[in-house]
Every structure is written in C-alpha cells, then in structure tokens.
Image: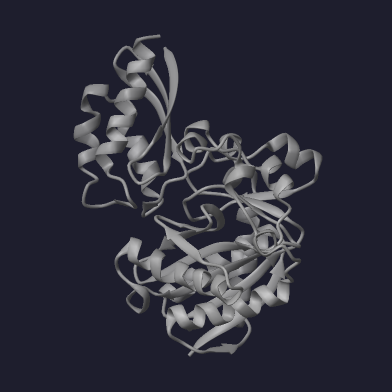
C-alpha cells in the first residue's frame, strides 16, 4: 500500500516538497508515495543541466509574470499550466521499482500510458522519458536518484494552453529537426485535443490513480505530509526561489 | 582567448550544449548543459572543474575517469568528450 497525496502549490514549494520527499525516502523515514499536484499559479521548470536562457523565453515569462525555477532532475523545460496539466511524483525505494534507470522510467511512465488508456487513447513510451499519442508528446518525466530512493516527476497535459507553452519554452533547432517539426507547437498535444472534448482535472486525476495503481501494482491510501516533510520542504523553498539556484547555468 | 559553443544530439535523443573558453589549447572555462540525464547530477560540476586548466588533448582521458562513477541515460561519457573536442574544433576553425 502506497500513500497518495493530492495538492496544489506555487512552483518553489512544489519543487521543495519533491526534494524533501526524496531526501526523507532515502533515509527510510516515509512510505512509497504517489503525489499528484498542480502548479498554481502556472509556472515553468527547467532541467538541472539546462542553461536557463537556452531553455525558456525569459522575456515572455517576465512580461506575463510566470514564475520559474530549476529542478533537481535533468531533462528539459516544462510549462505547468494550472488549468491544464497534472504533475505526478513517484517517490519510492529503488528496489521497489528497478535498479536499471531506463527500466524504471519505463515502469513509471506505464502509469501515464495506463491513465491515457482510461480515456481510450493509445499512448507509447519513447525512451528516455517521453509518452506520446499519435507521435505527439503528451507527457514528459524526469528522475533523480539518491543512494536508495528515487524521485520521478512528470507531467500529464489534459488541457494545457499550447500557445502559451510554445511561447514560454525554447527548444534547440537541432532537437526540432530530429523530430521533423519546425516548432514546439507541432510536437505536443493534450488529452482534450486528442478527444475533441474538454477533459477536467478530476477526470485526469482519477485516471492517473488507476493508471499508477496498475503500473506499480499497488493500492493507494489517501494521506498527507508528515510534520518532518513539511518542515524540510519549508527549509528548501528559499533555495528554489533564489537567483543563485535558478541562474546557476 | 576564444569562446565557442556547439549544440549536439546525443545517441539517445537528448541534447548537449558545450560552451568553451580556450587560450591556445588550454581550457579556461567549460559549461556542459542540455536536457540529458546524468547521475549523480552534481558530478557535472566535478567534471567541469576537472577540465578547467587542462589541454583539450587530455579531455578524453579526464572524462574516462568518470566512466564508473557517473551514469548517463542513453548516452556515454565518451560522447560528452567528443562533443567537447568538436566544440574546440569550431573554436580553432574560427
């Protein structure tokens, strides 16, 4: 039985909570946890290794007052739409998923593929970290590891405003060329767009719970953070809000 | 001093960007960025600092020391070395 937490925070606190969960899981102090959450207000995160100015359109973010921070995980930049995207975090002991990194991505992304299956959509895992529907990306994930625990967080876009997404993120032309598209807009999709109807947040969350239950072969018990988790997360918030962290490269 | 940068696709589909600052053959500064996955993440700073002050001809040897200590998902440390050397070539060719 895993713990399930559903919540909503600003970008700094969301990333602080994920890191706190990973640290405390690594110390063996908390149960395996599935966290489903929303970035409110909408925000952008960039991968640990990315140069901020290469990964996002800083001018657009500033003009539109969109918050952003750097993740502890690698991978690319992400637009988290408060009204169109659910982020998941799987925090677990490494042996409970897989020691093999690619295999663990595949297992956890299986939860997203199953969730899309609940909507009647056929999705595919594209290594390392993408889930696509009809060749278009609908979910991206990133994993960070400590000695004995892993954190994989990722997105599921159900109604993301793709024009805003395309305005906030930058993709190198080398990457677009390989995907045979000229803009990010052509490369991504949402559940609502695929189904031709408006899909709600609650529908998406319910499908994700079912999807991860199958992929991780577990039931979930709805719970909440421990005092220790909240305390550590609170301590980490200032890092994620700091210029030093965000603009380190 | 010359600065140059190069963006390259890694074999697994991720992107690497190398920003290089060299004086002659000596690396004054290097930043390895991109949307790849390298574990443990903090080692990127160790790799970069190991390269500073070294000659470009030593890059492969220096990076091969990290073969057992870092894992790059769907790419290799050798590809990182190649990317740095290739970036240097663009410096030299102007």
From this view, report whether residue B18 is shown above or below residue A238.
Answer: above
Place residue B83 in its image quadrant: top left
Up-down relation of residue B30 to residue B88 (above or below) = below
Q: Residue drawn 53% across and 34% down?
A: A172
Q: Nearer the viewer, residue A146 or B50?
A: A146
Percent x, y for residue A149?
Answer: 40, 71
Total numbered labels:
0
> Where's residue B24, x and y in %?
32, 12
Q: Quadrant of the C terminus of chain B?
A: top left
Q: Does residue B89 lie above or below A83 as drawn?
A: above
Q: Quadrant of residue A97?
A: bottom left
The N terminus of chain B lies in quadrant: top left
Residue occupying the far top of the picture: B94
Residue at 74 percent across and 66 percent down: it is: A197
Residue B54 locus on image (x, y percent) = 28, 25
Q: For this view, does A91 lie left or right of residue B27?
A: right
Residue B55 visible in the picture:
no
A118 left or right of A61 in image: left
Whether residue A210 is visible to the viewer of this picture, yes or no, is yes
Asked if B76 appears above or below A84 in the picture, the reply is above
> A213 or A31, which is in the foreground?
A213
Q: Hey, which quadrant is residue B58 in on the image?
A: top left
Colour scheme employed for the rendering of this structure: one colour
> Residue B35 in the image: x percent, y percent?
47, 45
Which residue is located at x 61 percent, y 77 percent? A207
Q: Give the residue drawn at x 29%, y 37%.
A: B79
């Amino acid at each position: 039985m895993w713990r399930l937490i559903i919540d909503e925070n600003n970008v700094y606190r969301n990333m602080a909570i994920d890191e706190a969960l990973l640290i405390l899981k690594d110390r063996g102090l908390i149960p395996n946890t599935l966290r489903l959450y929303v970035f409110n207000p909408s925000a952008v995160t960039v991968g640990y290794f990315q140069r901020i100015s290469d990964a996002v359109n800083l001018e657009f973010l500033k003009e539109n007052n969109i918050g952003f921070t750097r993740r502890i995980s690698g991978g690319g930049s992400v637009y988290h739409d408060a009204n169109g995207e659910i982020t998941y975090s799987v925090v677990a002991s490494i042996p409970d998923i897989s020691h093999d990194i690619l295999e663990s991505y595949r297992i956890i992304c299986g939860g997203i593929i199953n969730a899309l299956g609940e909507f009647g959509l056929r999705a595919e895992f594209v290594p390392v970290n993408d889930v696509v529907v009809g060749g278009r990306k609908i979910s991206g994930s990133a994993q960070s590891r400590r000695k004995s625990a892993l954190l994989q967080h990722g997105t599921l876009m159900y109604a993301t405003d793709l024009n805003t997404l395309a305005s906030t993120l930058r993709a190198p032309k080398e990457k677009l060329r390989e995907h045979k598209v000229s803009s990010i807009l052509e490369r991504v999709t949402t559940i609502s767009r695929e189904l031709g109807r408006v899909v709600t947040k609650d529908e998406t969350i319910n499908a994700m719970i079912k999807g991860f239950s199958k992929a991780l072969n577990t039931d979930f018990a709805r719970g909440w953070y421990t005092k220790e988790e909240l305390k550590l997360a609170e301590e980490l918030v200032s890092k994620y809000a700091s210029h030093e962290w965000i603009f380190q490269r | 001093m010359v600065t140059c940068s190069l963006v390259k696709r890694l074999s697994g589909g991720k992107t690497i960007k190398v920003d290089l600052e060299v004086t002659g053959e000596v690396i004054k500064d290097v930043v390895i960025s991109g949307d790849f996955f390298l574990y443990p993440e903090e080692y990127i700073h160790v790799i970069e600092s190991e390269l500073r002050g070294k000659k470009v001809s030593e890059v492969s040897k220096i990076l091969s020391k990290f073969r057992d200590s870092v894992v790059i998902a769907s790419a290799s440390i050798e590809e990182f070395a190649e990317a740095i050397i290739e970036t240097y070539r663009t410096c030299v060719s102007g």
